[in-house]
Image: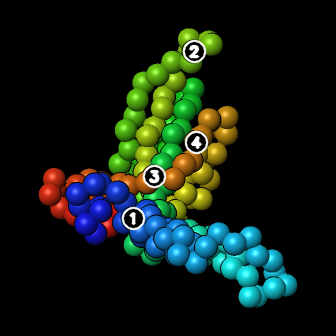
Amino acid sequence: MILQKYFHIRFSNAILFVDAVVVCFGLLVIGFGVGNADDASQPSWYLSLYSLISIFVISRVVAYVINGAKEDKLLFVISDKEMTELHRFILKDLDRTATCIKSSGLYTGAEKEMLFLVVSHKEVTSVKHKIKEADPRAFVVVTDAYDTFGEGWKQLPSKDELQPE
C-alpha cells in the first residue's frame, strides 16, 4: 500500500515486486548452486525460479480479485444509414444513451453515422442483433472498457482517494 500511495505502483505489481525481491535475496543467501533435480543436497536455482513464477501468477490473481472482471463493453457502430430504430432501442429498451458522431469515410468521403456506446457484457448480444436488423452492413467494433465513469456507472474518483489498482 505504501508503494502504491507514494510511488504510484499498482497494488498487485507492488506485491509482485516485494515478493520477487525477497526470493532474490533468498537466492543470494542460499546460493546460486546449479544443482540438479536428482540430487536434493545441492542448492538449486529451480526453487527460486518456481517461486518467481508462482508469485507472478498470484499477483495476477490478486489484481483480478481486487478489480473484478472488466465486463463493461465499448461499442463503435459505423453505418451509412441513419439507424433510428437502433437509437430507440438504446434509449427505451436498454435505458442507456450513446453519442452519435457525424463522420465520413476516408476512402469514399461518404457521410456516415458513428455511435459510441458503453453497455454491460450481458447487453452486447442484444445490441449486435439490433444493429444487424438496422443495418446488416454496419461496421461494429466491440472492445473491453477498462473503467467506465459517469451517470449510470461509477463516480469519478477524487484526487486523494486511494484506488485498489
Q: Which residue is drawn at 76% across and 88% down?
A: 40
CA gap, disc 3 and disc 4: 12 Å
Q: In the drawing, does residue 123 fall left or right of residue 32?
A: left
Q: In this view, does 41 lie above or below 53?
A: below
Circles 2 and 1: CB atoms closer than 8 Å = no
In the image, residue 44 sits, relative to residue 92, either above or below, namely: below
Judge by depth and name the residue closer to the eye, 10 or 161. Answer: 10
Which of the two discs, 3 and 2, sits closer to the camera?
Answer: 3
Q: Name the residue under label 4.
A: 141
Can you tell which mark lies on residue 14? 1
- Badge 3 amino acid: Ala
Q: Quadrant of residue 140?
A: top right
Residue 106's tag is 2
Q: What residue type is labelled 1?
A: Ala
Kindly state the secondary structure of the residue where label 4 is placed. Answer: strand
Secondary structure under tag 2 reads loop
Residue drawn at (23%, 61%) of the image: 5
Return the disc, 2 or 1, that comes first in the chain's sequence: 1
Q: Which residue bears the numbered disc 3?
A: 145
Q: Earlier in the sequence, mark 1 or mark 3?
A: 1
* Amino acid identity at mark 2: Leu
Q: Distance between the residues labelled 1 and 3?
A: 24 Å
Expressed as whole percent of the image width and height from the top left, the position of residue 165 reads 36, 62
Compared across the picture, whether 37 is left or right of 134 comes to right
Q: Where's residue 16, x and y in %?
A: 47, 67
User: What kind of colouring is applied to the model shown?
Assistant: rainbow
Looking at the image, is mark 1 or mark 4 earlier in the sequence? 1
